[in-house]
């Protein structure tokens, strides 16, 4: 449900400019900036070997044939209709890929899939008007009113690519919800009955990946067809990793109900509760520096620290105690020179300004780092 124009997530997040190195504490309005230095990367191989690189995967399992629910964008004669199901991240994660399984009309060609869009929502009351309107039985544990804008990916926008494959040419489902999405007290319809269609698996790759910190979220895919509608299939509760505490059921809404949502099982059909058939995979970012653990040469970077593309801050590239490769600074001048080279590199990459560079180098020069004890 669009709330604002699409914006692309950048690898280098805007972060407060801070440093924990005593020699880099500035006396002006600038806090010391964490820096990186390309020429020092080779000296960080030892640090890289300590990185706890990890991957992320999540799945609700194969479709169970219990229910199929509409998930499509708006068109000239059709309301936008959304289905969403939840997942939990225990730490910062880059989501690279996802799959979800649904129904195409019987006999439809895969070429009828013209676009796929994915949105991610916080759990209500985040990103929502609170108290809610009262047009639905409850908003507790529902998706928020609006999506996380920077997590939206769309095939038309070029921020995701997708492929589809037919798993079963005739897949029967016991119940469905397409149009019966009503405000309270008329929310219960019992569903619209059995439906059979082509079971299709849609795989999407996000470019750029979706970065999310540890939290509870809802995943909402939407499929545009040139003919007919896509129905998202239900599935058992999450199986990979094992069932997590706090699993919520699938929710649904259309443009007439928005910003509110209904529980598909509890509110609309009095069945379930249901989960939806989907999976996601990606890479962990334990220190939340915007660089996946597998590519992070400097793990455990303090939060809200500016890093380079290798995930390294100034305190990790040029520690006050001595070079990152080991040993001690030959003298104070060597330390200051390392900081200056790093600052110049970050200015060239557009990560800091000239003014910030000057403050950083001045702070390093005024420190005792590298000085010999007399």
Image (cartoon, rainbow, N blue to C red):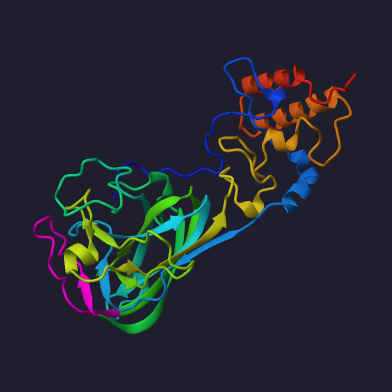
Residue extending furthest toward the left: 185
Query: How far across and how far down the image is residue 307, in percent?
Result: 63, 38
Q: Is residue 339 above or below residue 327?
A: above
| Quarter of the figure that contains the C terminus | top right
**Position of residue 85 measured from the top left corner of the image (x, y, whole percent):** 34, 61
Q: Taking the image as drawn, is residue 75 in sight?
A: no
Which residues are drawn in magenta? 174-197
Q: Nearer the viewer, residue 296 or 140?
A: 140
Of residue 355 and residue 251, the one placed in the foreground of this image is 251
Q: What secondary structure is the magenta-colored segment mainly? A: loop
On the image, which quarter does residue 316 sit in? top right
Q: Is residue 118 above or below residue 174?
A: above
Q: Residue at x 28, y 79 (%)?
A: 197
Q: How many marks?
A: 0
Q: Residue furthest front?
A: 245
Tell me if residue 188 is in the magenta stretch: yes
State the image coordinates of residue 267 (x, y, percent, origin top left): 18, 62
* Up/down of 8 relative to 101, above or below: above
Identify the residue at image location x=29%, y=66%. 226
Residue 320, quarter of picture = top right
In the image as oriented, which residue stretches furthest toward the top? 28
Residue 297 shows in this picture: yes
Horizontal side, residue 121 vs residue 92: left or right: left
Residue at point 16%, 71% (across, down): 191
Coordinates of residue 231 in the picture (x, y in percent)? 28, 69
Q: Is residue 47 magenta?
A: no
* Relative to 19, 43 lies left or right: right
Q: Residue at x 86, y 33 (%)?
A: 328
């Amino acid at each position: 449900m669009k709330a604002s124009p699409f914006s692309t997530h950048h690898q280098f997040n805007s972060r407060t400019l801070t440093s924990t190195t005593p020699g880099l504490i500035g006396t002006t309005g600038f806090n010391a900036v964490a820096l990186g230095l390309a020429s020092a990367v080779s000296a960080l191989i030892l640090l890289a070997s300590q990185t706890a690189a990890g991957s992320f995967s999540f799945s609700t399992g194969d479709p169970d044939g219990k229910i199929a629910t509409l998930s499509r964008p708006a068109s000239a004669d059709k309301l936008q209709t959304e289905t969403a199901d939840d997942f939990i991240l225990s730490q910062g994660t880059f989501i690279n890929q996802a799959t979800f399984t649904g129904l195409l009309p019987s006999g439809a060609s895969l070429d009828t899939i013209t676009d796929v869009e994915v949105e991610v929502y916080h759990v209500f009351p985040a990103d929502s008007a609170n108290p809610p309107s009262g047009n639905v039985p409850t908003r507790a544990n529902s998706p928020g009113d609006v999506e996380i804008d920077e997590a939206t990916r769309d095939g038309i926008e070029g921020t995701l690519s997708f492929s589809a494959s037919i798993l079963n040419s005739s897949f029967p489902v016991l119940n469905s919800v397409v149009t019966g999405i009503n405000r309270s007290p008329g929310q219960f319809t019992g569903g619209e009955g059995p439906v059979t269609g082509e079971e299709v698996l849609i795989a999407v790759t996000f470019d750029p990946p979706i970065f999310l910190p540890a939290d509870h979220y809802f995943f909402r895919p939407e499929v545009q067809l040139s003919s007919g509608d896509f129905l998202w299939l239900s599935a058992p509760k999450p199986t990979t990793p094992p069932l997590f505490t706090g699993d919520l059921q699938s929710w649904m809404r259309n443009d007439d109900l928005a910003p509110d949502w209904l529980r598909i099982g509890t509110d609309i059909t009095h069945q379930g509760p249901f989960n939806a058939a989907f999976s996601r995979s990606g890479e962990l970012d334990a220190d939340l520096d915007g660089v996946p653990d597998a590519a992070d040469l400097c793990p455990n970077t303090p939060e809200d620290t500016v890093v380079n593309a290798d995930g390294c801050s100034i305190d990790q590239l040029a520690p006050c105690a001595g070079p990152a490769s080991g040993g001690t600074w030959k003298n104070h001048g060597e330390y200051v020179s390392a900081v200056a080279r790093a600052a110049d590199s970050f200015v060239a990459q557009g990560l800091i300004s000239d003014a910030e560079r000057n403050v950083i180098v001045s702070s390093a020069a005024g420190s005792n780092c590298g000085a010999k004890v007399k």
